Amino acid sequence: MNEKQMIEHIPLPDLTGMQCYNQPFIVAWWSAGITSAIACKMALELYDNVELYYIHIDTAHPDNERFKSDCEKWYGRKIKTLKSRDFKDQFDVIENHGGDAVNTPYGAPCTLHLKKNVRFDFEKLNELTLFNQRTIKGQVWGYEFEAKEINRAIRHLQQYPSTKPLFPLIEKGLTKENCAALLIDAKIELPEMYKLGYSNNNCIGCVKGGMGYWNKIRIDFPKVFERMANLERKKGYSCLKKDHKAFFLDELTPEMGRMNTELIPNCGNICEVEFADIPDKNLESILSGRKSIYEAA
């Protein structure tokens, strides 16, 4: 039998019933925050084939599990949990990631290792290949309709177009206060961190917090404060800066900082975006309704 005849006699697999077409889906990122909870609810109502995902970190407030369960009941859909394979929380990153920095002008290492890298791995897992037909056709983010958040969303859209971002709260003009009201109307109790007076539901002991934040942590979670203060001295790097120099938590006095004037960004899967504090030329047009958020790319 010659080579041509041998090829002709190779049995072909039966492809009957196999789904060989692309199966795109939308990811809605649930972060245990007020705005992401409403963004996920809107995503389920606005788009087809939506899947909900949460990136868990061990220093999240334990009440987040209650809030997650309440949201799942409201959505009629489970929220799938992802987690870093390498690190448990921000303390683990600071201790063991190989660098000494606690926070940097370019972002916190814990955000990269605990959230961004988890998302990058998830995106790579869902790239279209010969062996994978599930692909991400869009990602829903909980940026609210507020100038600073809209500006962050614009920068996100410009810098991470490959995430195919969707901003339903900005599209519908919903603020964080609007989102809180919608949750209360749905008889869902707000997460404990908000009830304690924090503006975001970040990890307890967020390295991006200011002096007022850390003074409040000292009162509400003294063991977390002490642990971070000791770790700062051990590593020789600090969360805070004063006069452009390192300022350690054990130097912080109770009257320093004002919690209600400090801007602490919500620690999402893309936390640090470049030029987030520089107003984009499209910002006013979006705020006034002359442009949509998607025209700012």
Image (cartoon, rainbow, N blue to C red):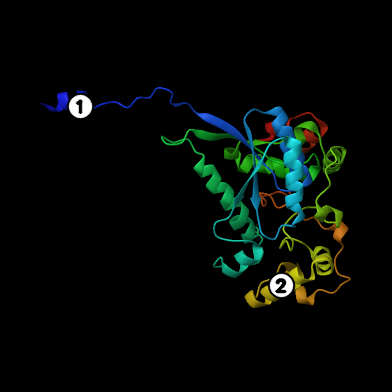
Residue lying at the far left of the rendered structure: 1
Classify residue 238 by image quadrant. Answer: bottom right
Amino acid bearing label 2: Arg
Query: Tag 2's secondary structure?
Result: helix
Tell me where residue 120 appears, x and y as whole percent: 55, 47
Q: Residue at x 23, y 27 (%)?
A: 10
Question: In this orientation, which residue lies closer to the viewer: 78 or 197?
Answer: 78
Query: Tag 1's secondary structure?
Result: helix
Q: Residue at x 76, y 61 (%)?
A: 209
Tell me where residue 243 appears, x and y as whole percent: 77, 70
In the picture, measured across the screen, residue 23 lies left or right of residue 214, that is left
Q: Which residue is mark 1?
A: 7
User: Is tag 2's residue or tag 1's residue first in the polypeptide sequence?
Assistant: 1
Classify residue 293 by image quadrant. Answer: top right
Question: In this orientation, which residue lies closer to the viewer: 216 or 143?
Answer: 216
Question: In this orientation, which residue lies closer to the viewer: 219 or 146?
Answer: 219
Amino acid bearing label 1: Ile
Which labelled disc corresponds to residue 227? 2
Q: Residue at x 50, y 43 (%)?
A: 125
Q: Is 44 located above or below residue 204 in the figure?
A: above
Find the distance from the CA under tag 2 to the CA under tag 1.
68 Å
In the picture, measured across the screen, residue 227 lies left or right of residue 186, that is left
